Image (cartoon, rainbow, N blue to C red):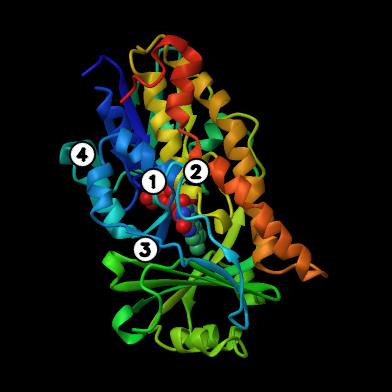
Amino acid sequence: MTDLSVAVVGAGIGGLAAANALRAKGIAVDVLEQAPAIGEIGAGVQLAPNGLRQLDRIGVGPAVREVVVPFGPGSTYRREDGSPVTSVVVGSSDGAYPVAGVHRADLLDALLAPLPSDSLHTGHTVADVVTLEHGAEIRLTDGRVRRADVVVGADGIHSRVREAVTAPSAPQFSGQVAYRGLVPRSRVPDWPADAFEVWMGGGRHLLVFPVRGGDLINVVGFVPADDEMRESWSAPGDPRQLIAEFSGWDERTTRLLSQIDSTNRWGMYDREPLSRWTTGHVTLLGDAAHPMLPHVGQGANQAIEDAAVLAELLAGADAESAPAALQRYSDIRLGRTSSVQAGSRRSGRRYDSQFSDLDRRDAELEESKEFRRWLYDIDVVADLVATSHPSTQGSTT
Ligand SMILES: Cc1cc2nc3c(=O)[nH]c(=O)nc-3n(C[C@H](O)[C@H](O)[C@H](O)COP(=O)(O)OP(=O)(O)OC[C@H]3O[C@@H](n4cnc5c(N)ncnc54)[C@H](O)[C@@H]3O)c2cc1C
C-alpha cells in the first residue's frame, strides 16, 4: 500500500468502482455510505465496451463477465407499431467488448467482493467536507469527524461533497418519469433472448433488455410526468398505469408490460456540466460530477471510466502532490463527460420522437451510431498513458 489515504463518499456503482481501481494501484481506501446496508435497486443497467474495458483494468472484469448478458446482433430500434428503424450498435468496433445487460445487484456484488469488509462503512452520512492544507476533513451528520489525504465525492446527483467544490445548483427536471420493472423471461418465451430493444413513439419510449443470464427482462418505460410526479423523486408506480401509457402500441409490448408485477417511477433529472470537479484535496466522481439522462446508457459507464482515470493519476501521488493529480483528473474527464451529458439529452429527444418529421429522427438515429462508436471504442486510460508517456503506450494494466 502507498502512503496516500483516500475516503470515497458513496457506495454506488461509481464509489465501489473507484474503491476497486484505487486498491488495484495499492492505495488505501475507505468507503463511507449513508445507507445501513450497501445495495442497489432491483433493475437492470447496461454496461458498454468503454465501461467493461475499465472493469477489466481494475480487476473485476472476470466477475462481471459472469453476470452480464451480451446483446445480440438482432438488437433493434423500433417504431411503436413494431416496425424496425435500424440496428443497435452492440459492441466495440474491434469486437473485443459487447454492450451487455446486468442486474444492478449482480454488478454491485461483483464490485463488493474484492473489497475488505473493514474498508466499507455503512451508516456514515456525510454532512460536509472541507479541504485543508494537507488533506480533507469529513464531518458526519452524527458529529463524528474523519480525515483523509483525498476525498472523492461519489454521492450521486444530490451530492453533499459537491458543495465543497462548486456553488450549489438545482438539478434540471426533464419532464419525464421512468417506470422500471422486471419480467421473468419464462412468462414471455417468444421475446428475443439477447436483444436490446428501443420502442419509440410520440413523447415516450420503451427500453427492453435481458439481465441475470437472460432469466429476467428489464423493462423501462419513459413517459411524460404528471403533476404528482413533479413533486417527488421516486414513488411506487402502478403497473396498470404503465400499460395504459403504452396502449395502442404493438401487441408484443402490451403482452410484455402486462407481465410486470411491480414497478417504481423515477423522475428524470440531470444537470448542466460543472465547470470544475476538484478543489484542493476533494474531487467528484460519477453522478455527483456529471448527472446525465439515461438515454445513451452511460451514467454508470462514465463513472467507471472516472474511477479508472482517477486511480491512474493518483498512483504514485502523496498527500502533497494529490491536489495536482485531482486537478488533472477533472481537466481530463470534463470534456468527455460533458459531451455525453449533451448526447444523452439529444438521444432522449430522438427516442421520444420529438420531431415533426420522423424521417429526420430515423436519419439522426443512423447518424448517432458514430457517437456510439466514439463512446465505445475509447480506452480512456490507454489514451491518458499515451499522452503522459508516449513511449509506454499500451503498458498499463
Ligand atoms: C432509469 C435509469 C436507467 C439507467 N440506465 C443506465 C444504463 O443502462 N447504463 C448506465 O451506464 N447508466 C444508467 N443509468 C445511470 C446510472 O444508474 C447512474 O449514473 C449510476 O448508477 C450513478 O452511480 P453513482 O455511484 O455515481 O451514484 P449513485 O448510484 O447515486 O450512488 C451514490 C451513493 O452515495 C450514497 N450517498 C449519498 N449521499 C450521501 C452522503 N451524504 N453520505 C454518504 N453516502 C451518501 C447513496 O446512498 C448512494 O449509495 C440509468 C439511470 C436511470 C435513472
Amino acid found under the numbered disc labelled 2: Tyr
Q: Residue at x 37, y 37 (%)?
A: 54
Task: Report the number of numbered marks.
Answer: 4
Q: Nearer the viewer, residue 286 or 129?
A: 286
| Dot 1 and dot 3 residues touching (CB under 8 Å) | no
Q: Who comes first in sequence, dot 2 or dot 4? A: 4
- Distance CA(mark 4)–CA(mark 1): 25 Å
Residue found at the far right of this picture:
356
Q: Residues within 10 Å of mark 1 (few under 14, many from 20)?
A: many
Q: Nearer the viewer, residue 205 or 90?
A: 90
Amino acid found under the numbered disc labelled 4: Leu
Q: Nearer the viewer, mark 2 or mark 4?
A: 2
Q: Quadrant of the C terminus?
A: top left
Q: Who comes first in sequence, dot 4 or dot 1? A: 1
Disc 2: which residue? 376
Amino acid found under the numbered disc labelled 3: Ile
| Dot 2 and dot 1 residues touching (CB under 8 Å) | yes
| Dot 4 and dot 1 residues touching (CB under 8 Å) | no
Disc 1: which residue? 97
Q: Who comes first in sequence, dot 2 or dot 3? A: 3
Disc 4: which residue? 115
Residue 301 badge: none
Instruction: Describe the element under mark 1 as helix, strand or loop.
Output: loop
The answer to whether mark 3 is within 8 Å of ligand 1 is no
Residue 87 visible somewhere in the drawing: yes
Q: Position of residue 92 (x, y in %)?
A: 46, 45
Q: Horizontal placement of 249 versus 298: left or right?
A: right
Residue 41 badge: 3
- Distance CA(mark 3)–CA(mark 4): 21 Å
Q: Quadrant of the N terminus?
A: top left
Q: Nearer the viewer, mark 1 or mark 3?
A: 1
